[in-house]
Amino acid sequence: MNLCIIGSGYVGLVSGACFAEVGHNVICVDNDQRKVDALQAGKIPIYEPGLEEIVHRNVAAKRLHFTNSIETGVDGSEVIFIAVPTPPQPDGSVDLSYIEKVAREIAGVLKKNQYRVIVDKSTVPVKTGEKVTETIKRYNRHGADFDVVSNPEFLREGCAVADLMAPDRIVIGGNSDRALALMKKVYEPFNAPILVTDINSAELIKHAANSFLALKISYINAVSAICEASGADVEKVADGIGMDRRIGRNFLNAGLGYGGSCFPKDIAAFIAISDELGVPFTLLKEVQRINRDQKERFLKSMRDALWVLRDKKIAVWGLTFKPDTDDVRCSVAIDIVNDLVKEGSSVTAYDPKGMEKAREFKLISDSVKLVNSPLEAIDGAEALIIATEWKEFANVDLDEVKSRMATPLIFDGRNLFDPATMHEFGFIYKGIGRRQTTKAEPALA
Ligand code: UDX
């Protein structure tokens, strides 16, 4: 099929590449000419495992194209996906102006004898599809035939290609049989379960799913505080409750809290839309509060151990909001670096992929020293913070780490290591909600 994707960010670019990979002809549209030029030259603006190979392969096979012209994209494609940003506004509600603009632009180039399916893939509040339909109707001066469909995307950064190629489910919200039949054809090669709903339900599924996952994280983080106060071990507790198939072990990893470009924004948006609909979702405010507290508790434990943070030489491993991505947006790791700088610490940081973007977007102070390896970061450090659980950190030589640090104090914000092992190596080690144990303790054998 001929498909057009408007917006070449994480969702748009990865979706476009994967649609091409399964055999569709895809044209990706972006209004940033520099991005289009870079993509045409084979340069991928984001780091995502496996993405570069698929883009190169499908460009070479002439199934994947890039342009800045919505008209070219819409003219040649029966299905048009909108994958533009939906950023948060200061009050938590979503700025839908990019969606509205694209809807107007699509409407302006629709032709009388061409039927088009316009699919919203961006994460939007419930009832946005209705607005998109109204807008296109209003600006569609030639009276072209079209339908609007909602098709939320559930990919995770860091494994976006894998998620897109083998999704748990595909949600398609629409009320036209013709549009739904075309959408099923688009997704046929993926062999994944398809759930067909009305547009409002499809939009709601996305916010409800992300909020539920964030709730799971805040739940285990609240439990981690109780573990610390009572001497229990959150990893064991998570294993124990996660073995119940009704609960599941996924998304029960205690840590510094959730971050990234989706969860913080989507939860705020879900709160805002539920307020607007007159049914405030107060539970989600508690999810946000626990997430904020988690970082504060971590900083407090550092103050408790180091007494004073001013002038302390602190190493930070990890800047991205999760491993296997270069995305540093809304990263708790970055917040912690900035908090430490504010308190007068001297911070040296290392991240395998995120340092360039942290500097480029001026997310961290110039005083933060960025270095080229985890070991370089800890030379002479009085404490090490593990803020992102990159595999590279789990494989370091712990003896070398200890000998390079001025004082062997580790605050592990992602529970990357086993406390008993760390104590054996001679570290003062503090994880999140972890029991301070020795190897001999049978419960941890
Ligand atoms: C999320 C959703 O998972 C995805 O379906 C949606 O399309 C976009 O939002 P993403 O933001 O890429 O994806 O990352 P995810 O793996 O969900 O992690 C989000 C945050 O939660 C990260 O900061 C991560 O460190 C944190 N997290 C995740 C935990 O703290 N504990 C966990 O157990 C899982």
Image (cartoon, rainbow, N blue to C red):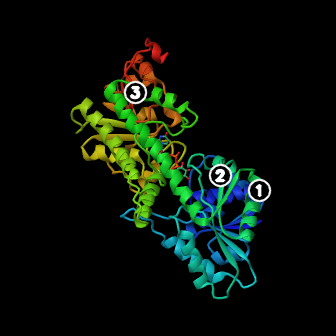
Residue 218 in percent (x, y) is at 42, 42
The numbered mark at residue 188 is 1
Name the residue: 52% across, 64% down: 124
Q: Amino acid at mark 1?
A: Glu
Name the residue: 47% across, 18% down: 444
Q: Is residue 328 above or below residue 426?
A: below
Q: Residue furthest top?
A: 440
Looking at marks 1 and 3 on the same chain, the residue that comes earlier in the sequence is marked by: 1
**Is the residue marked by circle 1 packed among few (<14), some (14-19), or many (20+) residues within 10 Å?**
few
Residue 172: image quadrant is bottom right
Looking at marks 2 and 1 on the same chain, the residue that comes earlier in the sequence is marked by: 2
Tally of numbered discs: 3
Looking at marks 3 and 2 on the same chain, the residue that comes earlier in the sequence is marked by: 2
Q: Amino acid at mark 3?
A: Arg
In this view, the residue in front, 394 or 150, is: 150
The residue beneath circle 3 is 434
Residue 127 in percent (x, y) is at 53, 68
The residue beneath circle 2 is 52
**Is the residue marked by circle 3 packed among few (<14), some (14-19), or many (20+) residues within 10 Å?**
many
C-alpha gap between disc 3 and disc 2:
39 Å
Mark 1 secondary-structure assignment: helix
Between disc 3 and disc 2, the foreground one is 3
* Residue 368 in view of the camera: no
